[in-house]
Image (cartoon, rainbow, N blue to C red):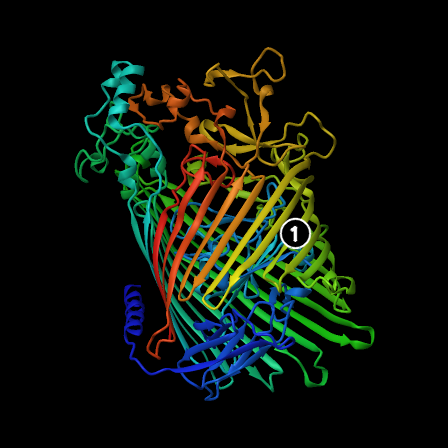
Amino acid sequence: MIPIKKLLITSCLVLGLTLPGLAQSSVSGTVTDAQSGETLPGVNITVKNMPERGTATNANGTYNLNVPSLQDTLVYSFVGFVKQEVPINGRTTIDVSLSPDVQQLEDVVVIGYGTQQREDQTGSITSVSSEDFNEGAITSAQELFQGKASGVSVTSGDGAPGSGATIRIRGGSSLTASNDPLYVIDGVPLDGGGVAGMRNPLNTINPNDIESITILKDASATAIYGSRASNGVVLIETKTAEQGQDLQVSYTGKASYQTIPKMLDVYSADEFRNIIEQQHGQNAVDLLGDTNTKWQDQIYNPAFSQDHNLSLAGSTGFLPYRVSLGFSDNSGILKTSDMERLTGSVTLNPSFFDDNLEVNLNLKGMRVDNFFANRGAIGSAVYFDPTQPVMVGNEDDPWGGYYTWTNSQGNPIPIAPANPVAMLEQQNDISTIYRSIGKLKLDYTPDFFSNITATLNLGYDYSDTGEGQVRVQENAAFQYDGSGIGGLWTDYNQRKENELLDFYIKYQNDFPSIESSVDFTAGYSWEHHLEESSNFSTNRLRQDTTVVYSDTDFATENYLLSTFGRLNYSYKDKYLLTGTIRYDGTSRFSEDNRWGLFPSLALAWKVHEEPFLSEFEKLSQLKLRLGYGVTGQQRINQGDYPYLGTYTQSQPTASYLFGNEFVQTLRPEGYNQNLKWEETTTYNIGMDYGFFDGRLNGSLEGYYRKTTDLLNVVTPPAGTNLTNSILSNIGSLEVKGLEFSVTSIPLSTEDSYWEVSFNATHSVNEITKLTAGDNPGYEGVRHGGISIGNTIQVHSVGYPRSSFYVYEQVYDENGDPIEGVYVDRNNDGVINSSDLYRYQSPDSDVSFGFSSRYEYKNWDASFSARAEIGNYVFNNVAAGASYIGLYNSTGYLSNTTTQLEDTEFWSSRFLSDHFVENASFLRMDNITVGYTFSQLPDVVKSMRLAATVQNAFVISNYDGLDPEIFGGIDGNIYPRPRTFVLSASLNF
């Protein structure tokens, strides 16, 4: 690993420093409107394949541009006009006329099994190109489009290196099944399951290789993916080269410094001593130490990270190619956490037989080395006694020399907080993952029938976790089991093989006699998903006693077979119709429920093309859309055989004695042979608008979604199953929402360009059914585990999913909560579980996304921000703060947060609505300032330097560490760092 890393970094430095200077030439001219003949100010002119080397026409429509060679090609582009590429051919004066292109017909977006011109879209689709991606220390694809699309929520899991994110498109459609969207990378769908030992499956793709990310939101756009599309589809396309492209070598390097923006406020050593002396007796005081340890400072530290990417793109004869190599080293602010990633990709897209056969070969490979910190240290750093030292000896002393709460026998007290530094330093949790995604796509258009294209797409996604291991030292107090056994030795591995075959035929034709055009696609798809894994866990050999905690081998597979079709029909290029249908069969359900039919229909009307709007010259687009569709959900989180009776073998520690031999038992599991798809029906109405030749454009959407056959856990009749709870298709859920987006270009001149984007989403959900019959007294499904075995949330009919289920707190005349006093909501004179009520939801009422980019000559500045309004969070950390919790009679002390001062509760009150807080927030995700150098040696076509601040600030009234918590329960998350990034991009 190290030699490859050094070679990559050295190569990049050599390429960046070897810059001999050569002469340049100048080209000037005037750009006009081809229809009116008027000059056009603000037209962008760049050298082809050198986007950073360019200029813009002035107020008179003239320009002057230094070019590396008079044999280059210039690219002329302007909003609302057709882009032109003009070879210089030795000229120094070039005048150009641009043709109006009000609808930007060349703007093509990726859809399922093909592409489509943006103006012909009938569904709800958002596409984010590489030009609009977020900047900074980006390690995964979801960070690129965070806050860029209405109706799409991207919540990072935490601040760990390479951490995953929760992505929800229009809120999701299920209670117990997966709500994750389907990810399709270069035409290869991911299986939706995680990879053992890997934080985020999207880390597979180097963000520098991504060209565009398209999000399919409504059923008319997603139904082509059938049983996996209820939660939307995210299409990721990577970069390729073009036929005839000159060799371009690109290098991007980033160095980042991560800091901890906020820590929890806990009592200092002196404050803690005072509280113990005031609230507890001499036994507690005798346990106090004489040091002053800030435990959070002991586990966190600033961290450095680096990212390097080198790519070569060009064309040799008939063979366009692109090759890239990337390396990232991301250290975490929690000590011992780190991620190293090496990625490589090769793309070849040649054409044969006079371009009748187009070949696209795409191979991506990666290796990720993960170093996981023991996250239990985060909570222990909050609660460990600040008067005690980190160390009281050396590694040869008991418990490794780390201060430990022990009983009279000198053994660790199991319920006492563990030394957080010991938890980090005495545990080694690592994994190495290899993953490769590839495809071979063949498009053939025969000469004798040029309206038909046949496509064969072969793809795979292989991953191998061959070196997953967890090691805990045998003298680690936090691993001591109370019987003289300590340490942990775990080895695990996993191999996943996902294979794909798609074959489809596309027919396109225009029928001028009836002013119509038709685009029809029909195909077949086959997928196979295989997983094999094993886990062996034991204690480390200590006192000649070995205990095997687990020893398992596991294998599973599933198949998905599909036929699909799509028809796009256009009449007079104004009235559009799209119909799709997919017939899916999955091996995850029984033969009676294995197949599902998923149709959709969408209509669109280009109103701006009508004669009655011809006088509205400022209106460049007005399109109305209406869509309907049904999609399914087969990822129900019940494995691949939920309809079959299975047996679970007991662990070695749970054997049964037969005679003189211990025998592992087989336990029958409950099952439901009638399980089937969840189905979501979606209605969508939308309007796309544009003014001033597209300089102001956007969309307005409204949608209604209803999921039926919703999976819910119910109690089966006694004696009918081998479990007291079973998953069944008996519920329904409704989601309604509005989405709005607008992009404006208020300024476009020779020297300046300014673009502003804004999007907003309002969404509400309601559970409408959870039982087979009408049962008004049914409480619902309680979930959302918190401290001491409590649950804080419930799914109930007539309420939003995951509503908080709490007691209504009573306050005194000063507004302070009265401990243990709640409202008797049913007026029966008794406070019990019947007085719990449903209060607020973790889902926000409204979410916003803001972004802006301003360019002035060679300078550029941009920012991206998000806001969530009306989301609530249960502050589990604050709810646990109590005076009684500071001292335990078994012989230890615990610190807590200063939020105890707000309540002064003697005991913890975990079910009080006082701790359900409004967590609305505004987060500035990134701020970037960059400069593009224009006077460079010819060997360097362009160079841009930039500085970025990620997670610049958060504005919120929430009392906890961070208001952005998916699921709404705050229980000591890994803090999101504030990151300062310096980057350099060079094209040769």
The residue sitting at the bottom extreme is: 90
Q: Residue at left 30%, top 65%?
A: 5
Quadrant for residue 265, please give it. top left
Front-lying residue, 289 or 42: 42
The local crowd at label 1, few if under 14, some if 14 to 19, many if 20 or more residues have their Cα within 10 Å, is: many
Residue 824: x and y in percent read 58, 15
Between 123 and 346, the one lying in front of the other is: 123
Residue 419 in sight:
yes
Seen as rendered, the residue at the extreme top is: 829
Q: Which residue is mark 1?
A: 700
Residue lying furthest front: 60
Q: Amino acid at mark 1?
A: Leu
- Residue 173: give x, y in percent of width and height: 63, 45
Query: In x, y percent, where is residue 595?
Result: 71, 55
Task: Examine the rendered structure and indicate whether residue 22 appears above or below residue 866.
Answer: below
Quarter occupied by residue 285: top left
Q: Position of residue 801 (x, y in %)?
A: 61, 36
Dot 1 falls on a residue whose secondary structure is strand
Left or right for 557, reference 56 = right
For the N terminus, the image quarter is bottom left
- Vertical placement of 485 versus 285: above or below? below
Q: Residue at x 44, y 62 (%)?
A: 855
Q: Nearer the viewer, residue 822 or 674?
A: 822
Q: Is residue 334 left or right of residue 686?
A: left
Q: Relative to 234, is 171 above or below?
A: above
* Count of picture labels: 1
